Image: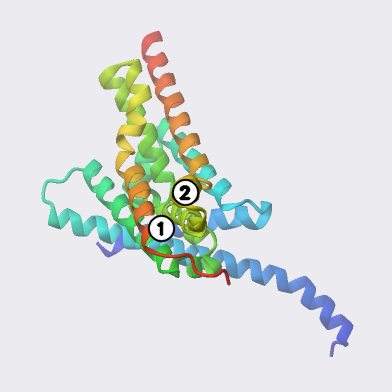
């Protein structure tokens, strides 16, 4: 038998860990599920658009997933999922859409330009800046390597 | 067919699990998590590993934001192949145009239609 203090100590020791395990499991399940939906969308369009190459399929799939992420955020569902799923809802491209829509909606009361249009990129801005800049660096390196060869 | 979906689910889940592990260990914000995985995608594409992973995992690696990074880097590389050094500047944005435009347009549309709910 444990005394009350022993129990509380034990609880303190164990509880955060199991909570952490739960967040990991939920991130895995929700993230995996969102990717599976994406695969389904891609396979559907592969059937619907015969002869579509991988590039076009990728463009269609990411557009559809971004639309879904934006719409679910509009209905308030995505943030409810995100409360439990954590990175499972952040890392997929739907999370990128959510990071665009969420602040835009939140600051709508500050007006169309300074509210919606400015705040839209509060979170997504760094993603675009770092992504575009790093891709240019990659391209420059590739060009340099080709020139030096 | 079913095997593909299992691989997609498993790899996509693992990618997100790694993200959650980073959050738990470092208290990273979602913007930092997204930037980290995006850059990971750029690097994997640049060193030529991304295509190998994609063949195995398909949407499991392209639906996470790593796919967006790969699209950008691949575009820049292909841009250089086609147009030389100017392609490094134009290629990334060109190939990521669908995703970027979709995020901007759908994002704008949704924030016009819906009002923010009171924070819980």
Mark 2 surroundings: few (<14), some (14-19) or many (≥20) residues within 10 A: many
Query: Is residue A114 left or right of B27 when viewed as pictured?
Result: left
Give how far across and how far down residue A19 sits, in percent.
65, 70
Residue at image mark 1: B111
**In the rendered image, the vertical position of residue A135 relative to residue B62, given as above or below:** above
The answer to which image quadrant residue B89 occupies is: top left
Extreme-left residue of the structure: A50
- Please state, as top left, top right, bottom left or bottom right, where the C terminus of chain A lies in the image: top left
- Please state, as top left, top right, bottom left or bottom right, where the N terminus of chain A lies in the image: bottom right
Residue at image mark 2: A120
Residue B44 or residue A119, whichever sits in front: A119
Give the residue displayed 44% in from the left and 20% down from the top.
A141
Query: Is residue A53 left or right of A111 when viewed as pictured?
Result: left
**In the rendered image, the vertical position of residue B82 relative to residue A46, given as above or below:** above
Give how far across and how far down residue B110 sits, in percent.
37, 59
**Residue at mark 2 to residue at mark 1: CA–CA distance:** 9 Å
Res. A61 in view = yes
């Amino acid at each position: 038998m444990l005394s009350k203090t022993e129990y509380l100590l034990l609880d303190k020791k164990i509880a955060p860990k199991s909570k952490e395990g739960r967040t990991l499991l939920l991130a895995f399940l929700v993230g995996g599920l969102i990717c599976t939906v994406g695969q389904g969308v891609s396979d559907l369009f592969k059937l619907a658009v015969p002869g579509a190459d991988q590039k076009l399929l990728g463009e269609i799939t990411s557009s559809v997933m971004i639309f879904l992420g934006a719409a679910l955020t509009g209905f308030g569902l995505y943030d409810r999922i995100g409360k439990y799923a954590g990175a499972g809802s952040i890392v997929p491209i739907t999370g990128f859409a959510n990071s665009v829509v969420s602040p835009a909606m939140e600051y709508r009361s500050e007006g169309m330009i300074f509210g919606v249009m400015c705040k839209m990129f509060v979170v997504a801005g760094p993603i675009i800046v770092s992504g575009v800049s790093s891709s240019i660096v990659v391209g420059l390196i590739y060009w340099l390597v080709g020139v030096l060869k | 067919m079913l095997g593909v979906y299992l691989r997609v689910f498993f790899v996509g889940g693992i990618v997100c699990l790694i993200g959650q592990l980073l959050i738990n260990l470092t208290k990273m914000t979602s913007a930092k998590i997204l930037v980290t995985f995006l850059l990971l995608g750029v690097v994997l594409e640049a060193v030529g590993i991304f295509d190998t992973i994609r063949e195995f995992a398909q949407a499991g690696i392209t639906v996470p934001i790593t796919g967006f990074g790969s699209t950008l880097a691949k575009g820049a590389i292909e841009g250089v192949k086609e147009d030389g050094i100017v392609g490094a500047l134009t290629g990334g944005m060109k190939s990521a145009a669908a995703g970027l435009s979709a995020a901007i347009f759908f994002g704008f549309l949704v924030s016009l239609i819906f009002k923010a709910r009171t924070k819980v």
